[in-house]
Structures are given as structure tokens and as C-alpha cells.
Image: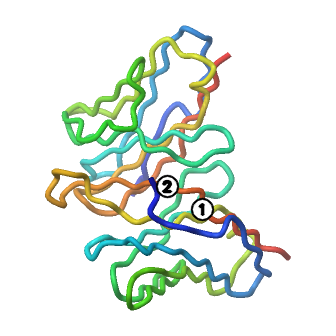
Amino acid sequence: NAGVMQNPRHLVRRRGQEARLRCSPMKGHSHVYWYRQLPEEGLKFMVYLQKENIIDESGMPKERFSAEFPKEGPSILRIQQVVRGDSAAYFCASSPVTDTQYFGPGTRLTVL
Amino acid sequence: DAKTTQPPSMDCAEGRAANLPCNHSTISGNEYVYWYRQIHSQGPQYIIHGLKNNETNEMASLIITEDRKSSTLILPHATLRDTAVYYCIVRVALLGSGGSNYKLTFGKGTLLTVNP
């Protein structure tokens, strides 16, 4: 009964590079959610995905950020041309259909 | 935005019950109340949820008032490891989803500090 897995746990990028964050949902979960937590702030919803579909991306920045949840493999949150303001903890959660969301341990992104 | 109001911080003595209040006066009839906690910088941990009836599990109890405008999370015997930020969340259905898709909106929560 592995929980939600995220990797890498820590990621360091220089300004202008790309960051790829991976999330493997719990077994049997077909819904994935991404949240961002800036230093000393609360969690902010970013995007909600089902297999091969984006359900709600109202919290995603308009530029540089994208997310996918392919038919096979983990969900990916991609940040292009990272800036220092992207430094944050990124959490993924998964749920079975419309039930309770369970969170992963997060990826801490540091942009130098 | 969050539909809940919580005190920013609370203290509790180790071994005593911790009672964390939450106001959600604009809650709709079919919206659930969820509680999560975040210990230091870890991922949020699910605690409990409820709709109308009081709920209990191995972690906590949830007491929801009859009018559903407020609730209380009870940790019956708090330990030092229960020190965390506790979030009370009203789970809202996405517009146009027919009640089949939901998202969570986190507020600032309550920082519970359990003291020895």
C-alpha cells in the first residue's frame, strides 16, 4: 500500500533551466492534484488532472507552467525557464474518483 | 477563497484533549468538511471528514453542529508529535462538474502547539 510518491524530493535549478516534477498516485487512484506552497505561506491549488485530461487549471500561472497525466506513467509538472520566485514546495495529491485526497511528501524546488 | 475561519494558533498540554474550532457559516447542504494537518514541511496528512453526523476514527473526532455552520476537531490525548498546522476545509464541487469533481482550498489553518 504505497502512498503517493513524488520525485525528486529536492531539486536545484539555475535561473532559465527547466524543472520536471513527477508524481505517482496511489494504486487505484485516477485523479491527481498539484499544489504549491511558497515559503511561510499556505498551500495553493494549481491544477487537477484525470488520465489524459486537465479538469481544472485555474491555479496554474499562465506562462511557463504545464502539467500532464498520461495514460501510462506518472503525472508531470513542468516549469520552463525557472525564476527565483518559483522556489517553493510542490505537493501532489491523488484520489480515487471523487473521494479523499492523499498527499505526497512534496518536491522542494530551489532556484539559484 | 477558503470558506472557513480558524484561530491562527492554539496551545495544548501534552496528554490533554485538543479542541480545534472552525467556522464555515456559508457551507452548502451537500458540502463536506475535511480536516488535514501539516507537520513542519511535510505533505498534508488527511485526518477526518464529515457531512452532518459526528465522526470518529483512530486519529480524531469531528463534531459538526446541527446547523452545520461550525465544527470542532478533537484530538483526545494530544502528544508532542501532534504539533502541526491544522486545516479545516469545505470541499467544493467544481462548477459545471455536476458534483463529480472537487478541489480543496486551503486557508491559513491553526498552528497547534502541544507543550510538555
Q: Which residue is mark 1?
A: B109
Q: Specify the label residue B106 is tagged with.
A: 2
The answer to whether marks 2 and 1 mark residues whose Cβ atoms lie closer than 8 Å is yes
In what quadrant of the picture does the N terminus of chain A appear? bottom left
Q: Residue furthest front?
A: B26
Across and down, in percent, residue B51 comes to: 33, 79
Q: Determine the CA span between mark 2 and mark 1.
A: 8 Å
In what quadrant of the picture does the C terminus of chain A appear? top right
The residue lying at 73 percent from left, 87 percent from top is: B16
Picture quadrant of residue B83: bottom right
Viewed as shown, does residue B36 lie left or right of B26? right
The residue lying at 55 percent from left, 51 percent from top is: B43
Q: Secondary structure at mark 1?
A: loop
Chain holding disc 2 = B
Viewed as shown, does residue A102 lie left or right of A38? left
Q: Are marks 2 and 1 on the same chain?
A: yes
Above or below for B67 versus B111? below
Q: Secondary structure at mark 2?
A: loop
Across and down, in percent, residue B14 comes to: 78, 80
Across and down, in percent, residue B69 comes to: 43, 80
Q: Give the residue type that dot 1 points to.
A: Gly
